[in-house]
Every structure is written in C-alpha cells, then in structure tokens.
C-alpha cells in the first residue's frame, strides 16, 4: 500500500511494490487513480504486510499474561518521482515476466506494450 497526503486528505492505494535493489521501490498506478496526480515530488509512505497471527496467553508458561499479535511489516518513506517511459516499460515488463510465467504457458501477455497476444 502507498499512502500520501492530498488536498482532500490522506489517501491510500493498493499496488504491487517492486524493489529496485538500490534502496527504493517502484509501483504503477493508473493515471486516473485518485492519488496519482498528487504524488510527483510528494513524500509517501509504503507499507508491506507479512504473515501475522494471534498469540494466546495460554501458550505462555506464566499465568496472568494477555493475548497479543505477532506480525511482520515493513514501512518505507520517501519522495515520489514519476517514471519516464523507458522505466515504466521496464517495470511493467518485470511485473509481467514475474507473474505471467506462473499462470500462462507459451507466449507471455504483452498487450500493455502494444503487441497482440499470440
């Protein structure tokens, strides 16, 4: 999820985050997304939720404990920059290659690149 302030208050979008490997993440939003026009140059907060689970006080050896919740989460904050066309194409290709390969046999889906599917 990516959170940012807008003139109409805080907004959040659910979007895949892709690590650049250099301490940054990339993501894609539709141009018509309500948050998209407010991101260029803004600071945003990205949140990734991992596994989580309830912890019963019955599992502790000492009496008088209370229930809790264990979880894994990653929060990242930083400035947002619009990708240029080459960077956007590379991001979409990377997302497609990673996920389409798990579900499709044969030629990968490339409609977003202006090519028709085989």
Image (cartoon, rainbow, N blue to C red):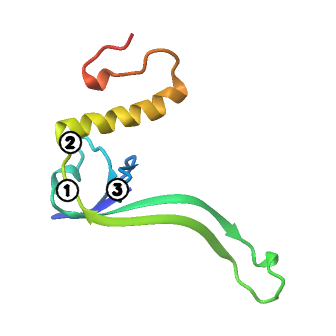
User: Whole-Å distance between the Cαs marked 1 and 3?
Assistant: 21 Å
Secondary element type, mark 1: loop
Image side of residue 36 versus residue 59, left or right = left
* Residue, disc 3: 22
Q: First in sequence: mark 2 or mark 3?
A: 3
- Labels 2 and 1 touching (C-beta < 8 A): no
Q: Label 1, on which residue?
A: 39
Q: How far apart are marks 2 and 1 (CA)?
A: 13 Å
Q: Where is residue 63 in the image (x, y as percent from the top left)?
A: 82, 88
Res 10 seen here: no
Gap in angstroms between the C-alphas marked 2 and 3: 29 Å
Task: Write down the residue under mark 2.
Answer: 32
Q: Are marks 2 and 3 in contact (CB under 8 Å)?
A: no
- Mark 1 Cα shell of 10 Å, populated few (<14), some (14-19), many (≥20): some
Residue at 18 percent across and 36 percent down: it is 85
Q: Is residue 33 above or below residue 46?
A: above
Q: Tell me the mark number nearer the camera, choosing from 1 and 3.
A: 3
Which percent across, then down, holds residue 113? 27, 24
Residue 34 locus on image (x, y percent): 22, 50
> Residue at left 45%, top 58%?
48
Residue 84 position within the rendered picture, expressed as x and y whole percent measured from the top left: 17, 42
Please tell me which of labels 1 and 3 falls first in the chain.
3
Binning the other alpha carbons within 10 Å of mark 3 as few (below 14), some (14 to 19) or many (20 upward) gives few
């Amino acid at each position: 999820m990516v959170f940012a302030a807008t003139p109409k208050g805080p907004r959040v979008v659910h979007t895949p985050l892709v690590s650049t490997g250099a301490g940054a993440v990339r993501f894609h939003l539709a141009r018509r997304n309500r948050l998209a026009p407010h991101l260029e140059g803004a600071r945003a907060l990205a949140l990734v939720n991992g596994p989580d689970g309830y912890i019963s006080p019955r599992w502790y050896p000492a009496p008088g404990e209370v229930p809790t919740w264990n979880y894994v989460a990653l929060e990242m904050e930083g400035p947002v920059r619009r990708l240029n066309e080459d960077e956007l194409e590379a991001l979409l290709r990377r997302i497609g290659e990673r996920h389409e390969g798990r579900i499709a046999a044969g030629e990968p889906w490339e409609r977003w690149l202006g090519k028709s599917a085989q």
